[in-house]
Image (cartoon, rainbow, N blue to C red):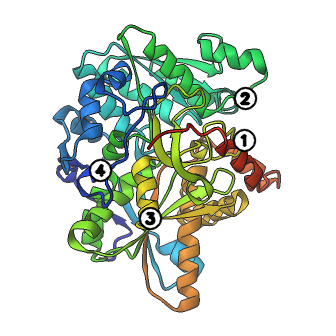
Amino acid sequence: MDDTKILLSEKDIPQAWYNINADMPVPPQPVLHPGTMEPVTPDFLAVLFPMNLILQEVSTDRWIEIPEPVRDIYRLWRPTPMYRARRLEKALDTPAHIYYKYEGVSPVGSHKPNTAVAQAFFNKEAGTKALTTETGAGQWGSALSMACNFFGLDLEVYMVKVSYFQKPYRRIIMENFGAQVYASPTNLTNYGRSVLAQDPESPGSLGMAISEAVEVAATSGGAKKYSLGSVLGHVLMHQTVIGLESIQQMELAGEYPDVVIGCAGGGSNFAGFTYPFLWKKFTEGKNIRVIAAEPASCPSITRGRYAFDYGDTAAMAPIIKMHTLGHTFIPPGIHAGGLRYHGMASSISALVDHGDIEGRAVPQLATFEAALQFSRAEGIIPAPESAHAIRVAIDEALKCKQAGEKKVIAFNLSGHGHFDMTAYEQYLHGQLQDFVYPQEAIEEAMTHLPQVAF
Ligand SMILES: *Cc1c(COP(=O)(O)O)cnc(C)c1O
C-alpha cells in the first residue's frame, strides 16, 4: 500500500478493550493500603472509585466490552489516522519505514479522552454526582472536562500551579466545558494548607495535586469520586483502542513493526499503543521490541528503583510496586509537563523488570530538536511529551541508516503541541537547558520509601 494516511472506518472502532492482566508473564503484585500497608480491600478503593471501574482494575478477562455510549462518543474522532512518515524518512535518508499513530486529532488534542469518556460513563452508571481530578499540563483536565460535560457530571480540577499560570488556555478549555479549576496547592484542603504553610511559593507538583483531589473525594461522603488520567490498570486498558486500531492499520499497510515506541509519563498512551502488540507477542510469538521514552530529568524507568511506593506525595494514595524516583520527588520544571510523575504504571514496571519493555531516557534539547525536525518534514507540531517518542524513533531510524537495515518503526504521536508554543519559543531562542536528574536526589528519596513486608 502506498498511501500516506492509513485510515479505518467507524465500524473498525474496537468492540472491546484489551486487558493485559490476562497475559502477564509474571504474577500481579498486591496493591497496599497507605496506612496499614496490607493489601487493600475493595472497600478502601470504593471510597475513591466506582465499583465497576474497580472490577475492571482487577479483572483477568482478556477482553472488556466497550459500551455503546462510549463507542458513540469515540466516533467523534476515532478511528484515528496512522501515517507513513515518508517525508521524515526522506529527510533522514533512512531505509527504515516509519509509521506514526496520531492521537492529536481528538477534540482536546491528545489520547486522554479515550479513558476520560470511559471513566465518566462508568461513574455516571454507578450514580456518581461529581468527579475530582488533578492535571499537570492541562491535557488530562481538558479531556475529563469534555467527558464530564457529555455525561452531565460536575468536575473539580486541581491543576499544578506552575502550569495553571504557564498554560492559561488549557484552563479556559476546562472552564468552557463547565469544570471548576483550582491552582494546586490550594487552601481548600488540609494537605494543600500544610504545603502552603511550609512554602507559600510552592509551584505544586502532580503528586501534590493528586493528594488534594484524593482528599476532596475521600471526604465527600460518597458524592464525589476521584478520577486518574494515567498509571492505573483500567486507564491503560481504555487506551488500548490505540494499539488495536494500529494493528488493523499495519495490516492494511502490509507490514508489521519491528519496534514500537511511546512516551511514558504514567504510561497510559505508551501502554495503549504497545500492549496490543505485546498481546501478539505473548499469544502468537510475534517478536517485537517495545521502547518507552522518558525525560532524562524524570527517569523513573531507567533510573528509578522497582519498589513499593505511594502513588502520591502525601502518602494517602495506595502503595504499588513500580519503578519510582520516590514519592517525595519534586520534578524540575521541564516543558513536557505530562511526563513528570515520580512513578510508572505497575504493569509497565513489571514488564520492564521481566525484559519485555526497554526504557530510554532522552534529554530535553535533543527532544525539541527531534520535534522540529519532525514538524518540518510532516507538518504536525507535536506535544513536547510525544516528542520523546519521536526522538527515539528518529534515533532508531538513524541506526538503520548506519547498519543499512530496513526496519519497520512505529510510534504513537500522543498529541499536538498547539498549547506548548511557549516551550517552542524558548527552544528557538536558546533558553532551554538539559537537566539530568541528580543521583544523590534519587538516593535520598529512596530513604523515604514505605517499609513494606512484601
Ligand atoms: C498526558 C500526556 C502524556 C503522558 O501521559 P501518559 O499517561 O504516560 O500517556 C503524553 N503525551 C501527551 C500528549 C499527554 O497529554
Q: Residue at x 67, y 45 (%)?
A: 335
Determine the secondary structure under disc 2.
loop
Is residue 349 left or right of 47 when viewed as pictured? right
Query: In the drawing, what numbered circle is on residue 203?
Result: 2
Earlier along the polypeptide chain: callout 3 or callout 1?
1
Q: Residues within 10 Å of mark 4 (few under 14, many from 20)?
A: many
Q: Amino acid at mark 2?
A: Pro
Cβ–Cβ under 8 Å for marks 3 and 1:
no
Rounded to the nearest angstrom, the CA distance separating label 3 from label 4 is: 20 Å
Q: Residue at x 42, y 40 (%)?
A: 112
The mark lying in front, picked from 2 and 3, is 3
Q: Nearer the viewer, residue 20 or 276?
A: 20
Residue 72, x across and y down, in percent: 22, 36
The mark lying in front, picked from 1 and 4, is 1
Q: Nearer the viewer, residue 268 or 10?
A: 268
Cβ–Cβ under 8 Å for marks 1 and 2:
yes
Rounded to the nearest angstrom, the CA distance separating label 1 from label 4 is: 31 Å
Determine the secondary structure under disc 4.
helix
Earlier along the polypeptide chain: callout 2 or callout 4?
2
Rounded to the nearest angstrom, the CA distance separating label 3 from label 1 is: 27 Å
Q: Report which residue position mark 3 lands on.
A: 357
Q: Report which residue position mark 1 lands on.
A: 333
Q: Amino acid at mark 4?
A: Val
Determine the secondary structure under disc 3.
loop
The mark lying in front, picked from 3 and 1, is 3
Earlier along the polypeptide chain: callout 1 or callout 2?
2
Relative to residue 234, is residue 192 depicted above or below? above
Q: Residues within 10 Å of mark 1 (few under 14, many from 20)?
A: some
Earlier along the polypeptide chain: callout 1 or callout 4?
4
The response on whether ligand 1 sits within 8 Å of label 3 is no
Q: In which image quadrant can residue 136 be found?
A: top right
Q: Amino acid at mark 3?
A: Ile
